[in-house]
Amino acid sequence: RILKDSLGGNAQTVMIACVSPSSSDFDESLNTLNYASRAQNIQNKAVVNCRKETERVEELHLQIKNLQKALEQRHRSETRIINRSATAKRCAPDPMARLMAECAHYRTCTDAAYRLLMELQEDSNLTVEQILRVKEWLCAVESERSELTSAGLDSGIESTSAEEQSPEAQGSKLTKAQVTAEMSTEKGCESVRDEEVAKLQRQVERLEEENRDFLAALEDAMEQYKLQSDKLQEQQDKISELHVRLEMAMPNLCVPELLENLHLVTAGQRPHTAPLDAAQSHGLSGVPSGLCHAEQSGRALC
């Protein structure tokens, strides 16, 4: 187990076992051969140390946090705008002047938005949904302008008959125009805000679903790795048990004779890589036939 943990990993390992034919170095040669026979069964695979899944999860978490921060900032800015407009309404000394100023401001914004939407309508990069929304808003503006024109207002410029009317009538018309402009502006802002919030929520849900899928896949991979590790450990224990049974079945095994008849390959003739089957067949070429027969009988006993 210690040998497996030390040689296993994300790398390719090459081991050269050096033995001596001298009888005085018998113990060292035997330990070296046992070590090499155990080490050749260890298989590892070199891969690049790159965990793209972890980076993807961190990127998704960061994107979710950024979206949440942007949503909070948007809510705070909208709250500040509402509070500022409420404070301005409370601090206005003259209601008529305030209404006139707000009406002029809304008319200016409406005209600017109308011109901008006309330019956007001519742009071919818009989607079908955006084109429909632009046309709907333009139709709403044109209908409001037609109502104001029929009421005595001509696209923000009052007619001479409206100037000759009483202040009460002018105030009622201005109030109506202001309410209409406020309602249209609020509807447009609410629709845009609701769409942005829905889009952010869909994106957050999609990211959370991807995160859950990745965690499930990671748990499955960890479980498979654990099962493979347990299976390899069982195989290693079984191999060790079979070695012990072989030693018990053949206690008179002549190891010096095995070492003398074993043909070793020199360092100059050894290739860079050699198949496992060829190496095993070459290593067993010098084993006596009696030893092979004894090994077969030992296996039969096991």
Image (tube, grey):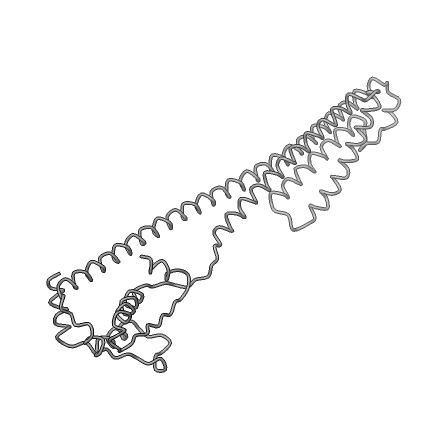
Q: Nearer the viewer, residue 209 or 134?
A: 209
Instruction: Answer with left or right where residue 288 lies relative to residue 193.
Output: left
Q: Furthest-bottom residue in view?
A: 268
Is residue 53 shown above or below 155?
below
Is residue 180 shown above or below 33?
above
Instruction: Answer with left or right where residue 97 lies relative to residue 6.
Output: right
Instruction: Estimate the x, y position of residue 152 in percent, counting from the top left.
Output: 81, 26
Instruction: Estimate the x, y position of residue 82 in percent, counting from the top left.
Output: 70, 28
**Residue shown at the point (71%, 42%) measured from the top left:** 117
| Image quarter hosting the N terminus | bottom left
Is residue 164 shown above or below 31?
above
Instruction: Answer with left or right where residue 18 lies relative to residue 209.
Output: left
Quadrant location of residue 196?
top right
| Image quarter hosting the C terminus | bottom left
Q: How many marks?
A: 0
Instruction: Estimate the x, y position of residue 236 in percent, counting from the top left.
Output: 26, 58
Q: Nearer the viewer, residue 147 or 67?
A: 67
Quadrant location of residue 135?
top right
Instruction: Estimate the x, y position of residue 62 in percent, counting from the top left.
Output: 56, 45
Q: Nearer the viewer, residue 24 or 136?
A: 24
